[in-house]
Amino acid sequence: MNQPLRAGVVGAGVFGTFHARKYAALPEVQLAAVYDPDGARARALAAELDSHAYIEFEPFLHACDVITVASPAFTHAEVALPALDAGRHLYVEKPIAISVEEARAMVMLARRDDLVLAVGHQEREVFAAMGLFRAPEKPVRLEAVRNGPFNGRCRDVSAVLDLMVHDIDLALTLDPSPVAQVQAHGVVTVGPHSDEASAEIRLEDGLVAILRTSRVAEGRERWMKLTYPSGEVEIDFLTHQFRNTTSFHLDPNFNDTPAGRDPLGASVKDFLAAVRGEADRPLVTGEEALRVLETTLAIDRLAQP
């Protein structure tokens, strides 16, 4: 009988807790380790899930077969590179890194040793459950708004890298043609990075993506409107509902699918299936996340006032 995979989570904050709970709930996985330089936080999460807490990275690394990196974005490459070099399969929360050079180094190490490098753009699970990735047409226009009130988290990166990156990933997945032009504008309210941003992405085959985001808005607003040759699809990410006037079928009951109910859990299972060789790839590969990062950073540079 195969031994359960030993899973570890880097970061015992909000996102690290989400990931740790997913691993702990899977019968074929042992949540073996939680790493966080904040010892009290690491011990609290480990105690909750009957795991072991580490405040030193090397002992943590030796306790794991697969690792989720859910620490602040500026630390992703700092922990991912030595983990990959040690032969560990990785699931890295978005963004994959905060520089193209770091992301390329991660992709090269994973490729060198045939390791799985997955990245947490898990809203792709929602689109897959709806059937949008199977649509027989490409969108010609995409509009997206992703706003929320200030919560104090993720201030190490801009709202572009924190929030807009989701919609950039979805746009580039719906239409993988090369990016031809990027325009952007940003506003700093709380700082130190842009807290609000708007962007326009033009792809070589004609798709125009208009994106807006704010993490200092009065309320939450998350929607996308896709215009196709045969009609429109409007998606409300908060209510998990959509309106479809196109000629192709989308699943109105996607919320009842495992991926629709729990996109994060589904993406973690996809990662583990790739590690075991049961799937050809995870939901989002390192190469795909690198491409998203390149476009996201181009927008971010233009959005810095």
Image: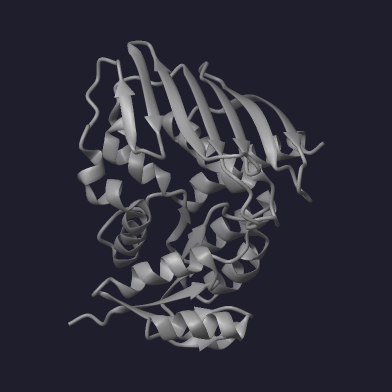
From this view, report whether residue 296 is shown above or below residue 84: above
Residue 178, x across and y down, in percent: 55, 28
Q: Is residue 105 left or right of residue 22?
A: right
Residue found at x 68% / y 61% = 74
Any part of residue 292 in sight: no
Residue found at x 47% / y 79% = 45
Please name whichever residue, 244 or 289, is drawn nearer the observer in this view of the structure: 244
From this view, report whether residue 67 is shown above or below residue 37: above
Any part of residue 71 in sight: yes
Corner quadrant of residue 65: bottom left
Q: Is residue 171 left or right of residue 103?
A: left
Residue found at x 45% / y 83% = 46
What residue occupies the far right of the structure in this picture?
305
Q: Is residue 4 left or right of residue 159?
A: left
Please name whichever residue, 12 or 170, is drawn nearer the observer in this view of the structure: 12
Corner quadrant of residue 103: bottom right
Q: Count the labels in the image.
A: 0
From this view, report whether residue 129 is shown above or below residue 179: below
Please name whichever residue, 265 or 109, is drawn nearer the observer in this view of the structure: 265
What residue occupies the far front of the structure in this picture?
218
From this view, report whether residue 228 is shown above or below residue 294: above
Query: Could you tell me which quadrant the N terminus lies in?
Result: bottom left
Query: Could you tell me which quadrant the C terminus lies in?
Result: top right
Q: How is the image coloured?
A: one colour
Residue 39, x across and y down, in percent: 60, 85
Residue found at x 35% / y 53% = 281
Residue 31, x across and y down, in percent: 37, 79
